[in-house]
């Protein structure tokens, strides 16, 4: 019995080894679906670290403007071609009847907004030795024509600012059927509202729908680094990037704070409505700064990241799911302005750190990001 048993053990072992050899290498883990990658494609290089406006063009594309940059308005086509609009300081001054060299040297373009049919509303600023160069003008890209909408005296009267209108900082934002003009001085601020339909026809009637912006029963006093952005429904966003605060305001000046989810840093741009079925909303969260040290991450996501919410569906795409040109500092990406191409659905975005104008194709919030962090 012992002899027979000793023979059987080696035979069984040899048989098992032969079977293992015939079976080939051990199978690895089952291959999953390919990871979805969102590519940020560079279209142009602007000045970095500047206050920049990116707004959608009706019919496709976008307009890009840097108030503290070179003062030019750039048009981005749906194909991604970037051109400069022929809106020079000399033409802006001439629309005011100011033809002197000192007038052209003193006038500057301070803010822009777009009307539903594609015309641009332009806010000018400055003063020469002879006159104020503050105005509200309309530019029609189709006819290349500038029209004066409001003079400095009319704006001073409508805002109640008087001569302080010459030193007021101005921001414009389109919001559907209305256009908002925010005028600010060290003494306070005024929000004026215009009907887009009237501006398109060449007339401007300013309305001051509220005296103060308020949060609850308290006046809202945004910081100096606050940006005005239009949003659907006639309201607007205010984003104080220095303080990391975002408010949503309605047409009566009532502010509702929009706090980031627990563990997220403050967004660097207002949420972008993608305006497709289900009205998905996309938010960009940059990498936390040293001042955000109090943030305790609730996940292992790597910043920066995009989060898209549509109803009860939410998809998160962190840095591992983002791609850009070689040597692009993706870890420092900080989108401060963006707009949706109304034709293709793509998004044009300005990165404040690199100064690059980027383009991306947003994924669906309902599509599985394949490991990119669906919640």
Image (cartoon, helix red, strand yellow):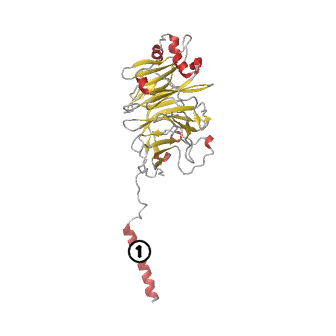
Position of the N terminus by quadrant: bottom left
Residue 259 position in % (x across, y down): 56, 43
Q: Depth check: 287 or 278 in front?
A: 278
Q: How crowded is mark 1: few (under 14 residues within 10 Å), some or many (20 or more)?
A: few
Number of disc labels: 1
Instruction: Indicate left or right for 302 with 55 as reference.
Output: right
Residue 352 image point, x, y percent:
52, 34
Q: In this view, does 231 lie above or below 190?
A: below
Q: Quadrant of residue 191?
A: top right
Q: Where is residue 319 in the image (x, y as percent from the top left)?
A: 50, 45
> Is 115 above or below relative to 279?
above
The residue lying at 47 percent from left, 88 percent from top is 2
- Residue at the spot of label 1: 16
Q: Is residue 168 visible?
A: yes
Secondary structure beneath label 1: helix
Query: In the image shown, does 316 or 371 lie closer to the viewer?
Result: 316
- Where residue 192 appears, x then y in whole percent? 52, 26
Judge by depth and name the residue closer to the eye, 85 or 154: 154
């Amino acid at each position: 019995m012992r002899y027979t048993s000793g023979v059987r053990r080696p035979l069984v072992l040899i048989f098992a080894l032969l079977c293992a050899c015939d079976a080939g290498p051990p199978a690895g883990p089952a291959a999953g679906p390919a990871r979805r990658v969102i590519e940020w494609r560079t279209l142009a290089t602007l000045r970095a670290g500047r206050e920049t406006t990116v707004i959608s063009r009706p019919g496709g594309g976008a307009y890009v403007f840097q108030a503290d940059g070179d003062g030019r308005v750039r048009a981005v086509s749906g194909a991604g071609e970037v051109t400069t609009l022929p809106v020079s300081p000399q033409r802006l001054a001439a629309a005011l009847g100011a033809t002197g060299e000192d007038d052209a040297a003193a006038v500057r373009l301070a803010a822009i907004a777009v009307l539903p049919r594609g015309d641009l509303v332009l806010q000018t600023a400055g003063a020469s030795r002879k006159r104020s160069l503050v105005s509200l003008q309309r530019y029609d890209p189709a006819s290349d024509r500038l029209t004066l909408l409001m003079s400095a005296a009319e704006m001073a009267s409508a805002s109640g600012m008087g001569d302080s209108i010459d030193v007021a900082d101005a921001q414009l934002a389109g919001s559907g059927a209305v256009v908002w003009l925010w005028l600010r001085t060290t003494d306070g601020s005024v929000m004026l509202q215009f009907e887009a339909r009237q501006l398109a026809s060449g007339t401007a009637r300013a309305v001051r729908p509220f005296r103060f912006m308020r949060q609850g029963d308290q006046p809202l006093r945004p910081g100096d680094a606050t940006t005005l952005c239009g949003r659907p429904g006639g309201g607007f966003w205010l984003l104080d990037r220095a303080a990391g605060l975002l408010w949503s305001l309605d047409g009566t000046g009532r502010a509702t704070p929009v706090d980031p989810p627990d563990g997220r840093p403050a967004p660097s741009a207002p949420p972008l409505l993608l305006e497709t079925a289900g009205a998905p909303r996309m938010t960009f969260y940059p990498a936390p700064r040293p001042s955000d040290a109090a943030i305790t991450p609730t996940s292992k996501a790597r910043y920066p990241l995009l989060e898209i919410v549509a109803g009860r569906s939410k998809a998160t795409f962190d840095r591992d799911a983002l791609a850009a040109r070689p040597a692009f500092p993706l870890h420092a990406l900080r989108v401060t302005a963006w707009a949706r191409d109304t034709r293709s659905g793509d998004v044009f975005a300005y990165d404040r750190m690199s100064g690059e104008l980027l383009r991306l194709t947003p994924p669906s919030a309902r599509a599985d990001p394949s490991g990119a962090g669906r919640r």
